[in-house]
Amino acid sequence: MLALLIYFVLEGNFNNDFIKTKVLLEYTSNTSFLIVGTFIFVVILGTITSYLSARFEYFGDKFFTICFILPLAYPAYILGYAYVGFFEYRGILSEIVANNSIRYDILNVYGAIFVFSIAMFPYVYILARVSFASISSTVFELVSLQQMNPIKAFFKVYFPLAYPAIFAGSILAIMETLSDYGTVLYFGVETFSFGIFKSWFGYGDLAGAINVAIVLLIFVFGILWTESIIRKKYRFVSSTHSAKKVSKIRLKGKYNIFAFLISFVIASISLFIPTSVLIYWFILDFNTLDFTTFGYLLNTLQLNIISSAVIISLSFIVIYMLRFYPSNIANITHKISILGYSIPGAVVGVGLLIFSSFLDKSLGFILFSGTFFMLIFAYATRYFASSIGSIENGFSKIDSSIDDASKIFGKSELQNIFKVYLPLMRPYILSGFLILYIDIAKELPATLILRPFNYDTLAIRIYELASNEMLYKVGFPSLVLIITTAIAVMLLNSKFVRRKI
Amino acid sequence: MVKKLTLSAILLASSLFAASEVNVYSHRHYDSDKILFKKFEENTGIKVNVVTAKAEELVSKLAIEGENTPADILITADIGNLYEAKTRNLLQSIESKTLQENIPSHLRDDQNQWFALTKRARIFVYNPSKIDEKNLGDYFSITKPEFKGKIITRSSTNAYNKSLLASIIANHGEEKALEFTKGLVDNFAYNPKGGDRDQIRAVAAGDADLAIVNTYYLGVMLNGKDKKDLEIAKSVKIFFPAQETTGTHINISGAGVTNFAKNKENAVKLIEFLSSEEAQATFAEGNHEYPVNAKVKPSSTVSSWGTFKEDNISLNEIGKNTKKAVEIATEGNWK
């Protein structure tokens, strides 16, 4: 990001009025509308699903636990394509009901909000589920003593307790929406990110792009600032080491049916329908399936696992330092590192290209350019926020009395980390790892620019096929991508279940 | 015998020593290209290494890397970005008799810095029950008031639209180009969205009566596995604009050898191969693009559209006007 800034200042020409105020206003209003809409739906969907899955047992709950994470495996633009394929003229829906006049035009800002909401609500779900599940029994005793009705109890007690996690998740969703380019271009919604691309790559107007990028950053600062104010109001520590976790409530009768129906509807919209579209395309393409897809899969797995592990370790170190050795520099570093998530991947990619090229030129030989190192660096820049959110959330659940206790026992710092903090943080680390894994599997723009020769991932394959506009060809690699994610989710889930968080 | 063995040993050693490879930055992400690279590897033993990305990004990448660039060849799917690379001194001139024979002169750079590999035409696709072909003519014909609310096309940021507008500037001047833009925007059924496939579908659905699209996408739809796509593509008609005047605007995919290519010889060999009859037939059949090599015929689908008069204006002229086209599109409010 620093490299980008320097590049901008050196190359940019600030005395221009090419990007007029009118255009900026338009970007601002479009972006605001898009993210407010997305925010509302992401919070609603994420809260309902995480609360249901963390607190209740009902028909199909274990199945839905996994379903609610999986939409995250789809790049938003694939969900967009799938829904366009479903709703368009002579689309799959009109085929099913055998009526050619049935169609819905979703290529507009409402359609984009819909797509981003179903693509991003799992961020809230993943983070908030851990929070809801770790509410201690004391809280429940309190609620029953007060004789609160369940709805009041939810809004007065449980929701505020899970609030930091819900907000952290929705911030991720918003940041990702802000950085998206493919979906908004396809849907014809002119956002900041759209503006940056239009100016820089479309118009070759770097100065204009900088102007838009600066406004975007101010926008993001505004969001983060609001978030920090709201979060201060809801500072709770509910310790994970409390004696008892409350067991889930077994729903019966109409409540059981109701919970099932809600889950089924959400899972249908966000997962079953788009997946069916992809399966339909997969069947259309069955005779000419391209099995090199598995080669792309191997590359994806390799890159993902290594990058996620590196980034999660870095986030742990940053938050650990903040907790035990707080300083302003650590604080600022932390806040700035989160910004990366809102910067379009292509901008991060080009920024790092400049950076690695500068390093190589200074060295006099090529060491960094076109290496995996730069690619992992790019992922760290982009996705630091998504792992730091869950680590931070985890640390916030560890009571400071544990810090004191571990000091009293006089163990070394490393021993404390491995014996005390890592085990306590395990569910949070795993959920962070999962989000990273999925994010990186989908990442496209930075991967496109920075990857070494002949190293294509599934996301790149999907992009290539989609930009040929042969949509049915997208089915197979997309399904492979989501199956890998599903396996990752189940692996992590089984650990959650086995060792009770 | 000994002589033969020594000779083959020397040959083997030299081929190993050469570490023969060629590094390609390509904006073309088609399976036809992958097949061709593989064929080239088999024919020559030269390994083809590829990174695909968007053309604008690849040009930026080349510029940033400077002489450290590992790339030997730049391939883009439009003339604008190739021209941009040329003006930023990222390409070099190469001498090749094969390329001069295989590629007509108006599809090559005057300094031999870039060479066209395939062509696509920017045409009208229309709903025959709504529009009478008699009312269509050149690109300006669809800016007439009678087409109000009936026209669609992709965003002006799309490379194909940029080049189309640049060709109008080159042929008719800036004033006429702005007039065209304003007239077009006035006649839009709605603001640009979706890809070319969506434009064709919208015309079939009756949301608009006419769309400006690329021949390649229609070819792909007509040959895909999706039967509904096929029916939709069949339900619309094609019109080649400007037959009485300048000819239909064509855009190219093309390649150039980078200024700091480390494997220049191999790079030239690969581009020569891509212009050969064998490779051109693969582009034509696999991807429904127009071949640039006159000895090769288009696919049967593309041939069925008939022959037409092409705009033979120098592509460098179009490249030169791309930036201006962007300004005019903005001024005319073409999103």
Image (spheres, coloured by chain):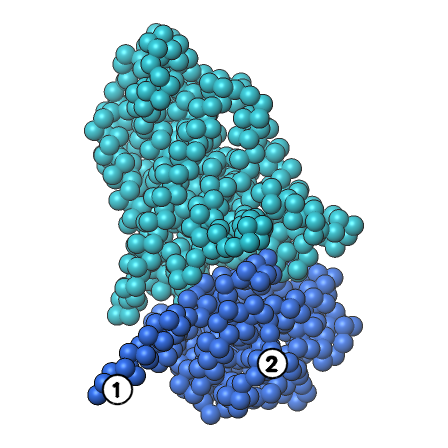
In the visual, does B147 lie left or right of A331? right
Specify the colour of chain B.
Answer: blue
Q: Is residue A307 above or below residue B12?
A: above
Residue B329 visible in this rendered orientation of the protein: no
Label 1: state its secondary structure: helix
Q: Which residue is mark 2?
A: B112
- Mark 2 is surrounded, within 10 Å at the Cα level, by few (under 14), some (14 to 19) or many (20 or more) other residues, namely some
Most extreme residue toward the front is B2
Residue in the picture at 33% in, 74% down: B13
Q: Amino acid at mark 2?
A: Asn
- Can you give x and y, in whole percent of width and height, for residue A246 in the image? 28, 18
In the visual, does B282 lie left or right of B151? left
Q: Is residue A439 above or below residue A241?
A: below
In the visual, does A132 lie left or right of A178? left
Q: Which residue is mark 1?
A: B4
Residue in the picture at 27% in, 36% down: A492
For the colour cyan, the matching chain is A
Q: Amino acid at mark 1?
A: Lys
Contact flag, marks 2 and 1 (Cβ < 8 Å): no
